[in-house]
């Protein structure tokens, strides 16, 4: 499976917090760190990862200091396919009813998804799964890991 993926912040954070190395969340985080998963990253999404990982409640759970969080995010950034959206969702509103994310706080995910044909958003956000954009797929971590396990056909 070589489709490009956008990994929502909730998946990355949960992957770091899980104690089960075989959980879909841990498999996705490991795939990001090893390059097994081809994922898209923008400066805005990376900043969101950092902001959430450094929230006091989240930081207490994972136990990493600021330096360790920055080192983890550097490892992720090195492997990522960098994309910086030039068209914002606001500019793309004429593209149809699903041009914007159901939650305006997630518009940057839609912007990033637009940059890759046949992209997949992996998220634990039920609203995003239930209301995907017309131009990309949205999957839960469990469904995505099942897709990863499928043999490639060509």
Image (tube, grey):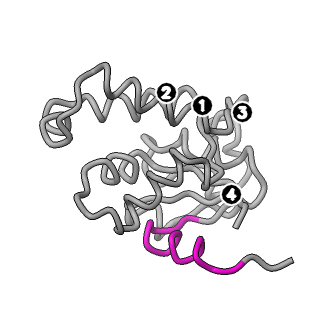
Question: Majority secondary structure of the magenta segment?
Answer: helix
* Disc 2 from disc 4: Cα separation: 23 Å
In the picture of the structure, the residue carrying the numbered disc 3 is 87
Residue 76 in the magenta stretch? The answer is no
Determine crowd level at label 3: few under 14, some 14-19, many 20+ residues with C-alpha closer than 10 A.
Answer: few
Determine crowd level at label 4: few under 14, some 14-19, many 20+ residues with C-alpha closer than 10 A.
Answer: many
Pick whichever of labels 1 and 3 is earlier in the sequence.
1
Q: Does dot 4 land on a helix, a strand or a loop?
A: loop
Pick whichever of labels 3 and 4 is earlier in the sequence.
3
Residue 143 in the magenta stretch? The answer is yes
The answer to whether marks 3 and 2 mark residues whose Cβ atoms lie closer than 8 Å is no
Q: Nearer the viewer, residue 43 or 64?
A: 64
Q: Quadrant of residue 126?
A: bottom left
* Disc 3 from disc 2: Cα separation: 26 Å
The answer to whether marks 1 and 2 mark residues whose Cβ atoms lie closer than 8 Å is yes
Q: Position of residue 135 (x, y in %)?
A: 71, 60
Q: Residue at horizontal 31%, vertical 26%?
A: 68
In the picture of the structure, the residue carrying the numbered disc 1 is 78
* Disc 1 from disc 3: Cα separation: 24 Å
Please say if 23 is above or below 11: below
Please say if 49 is above or below 149: above
Question: Magenta segment range?
Answer: 138-151
* Disc 1 from disc 4: Cα separation: 20 Å
Determine crowd level at label 2: few under 14, some 14-19, many 20+ residues with C-alpha closer than 10 A.
Answer: some
**Front: mark 3 or 2:** 2
In the picture of the structure, the residue carrying the numbered disc 4 is 119
In the picture of the structure, the residue carrying the numbered disc 2 is 74
**Front: mark 3 or 4:** 4
Q: Position of residue 92 (x, y in %)?
A: 70, 41
**Residue ranking furthest to the top:** 67
The answer to whether marks 2 and 4 mark residues whose Cβ atoms lie closer than 8 Å is no
């Amino acid at each position: 499976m070589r489709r490009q993926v956008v990994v929502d912040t909730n998946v990355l954070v949960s992957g770091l917090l899980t104690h089960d190395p075989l959980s879909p969340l841990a498999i996705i985080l490991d795939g990001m760190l090893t390059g097994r998963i081809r994922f898209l990253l923008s400066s805005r999404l990376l900043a969101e990862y950092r902001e959430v990982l450094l929230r006091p409640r989240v930081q207490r759970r994972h136990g990493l200091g600021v330096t360790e969080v920055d080192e983890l995010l550097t490892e992720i950034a090195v492997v990522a396919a960098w994309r910086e959206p030039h068209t914002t969702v606001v500019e793309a509103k004429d593209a149809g009813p699903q041009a914007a994310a159901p939650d305006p706080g997630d518009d940057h995910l839609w912007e990033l998804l637009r940059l890759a044909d046949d992209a997949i958003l992996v998220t634990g956000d039920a609203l995003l799964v239930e209301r995907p954009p017309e131009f990309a797929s949205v999957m839960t971590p469990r469904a995505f890991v099942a897709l990863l396990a499928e043999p490639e056909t060509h």
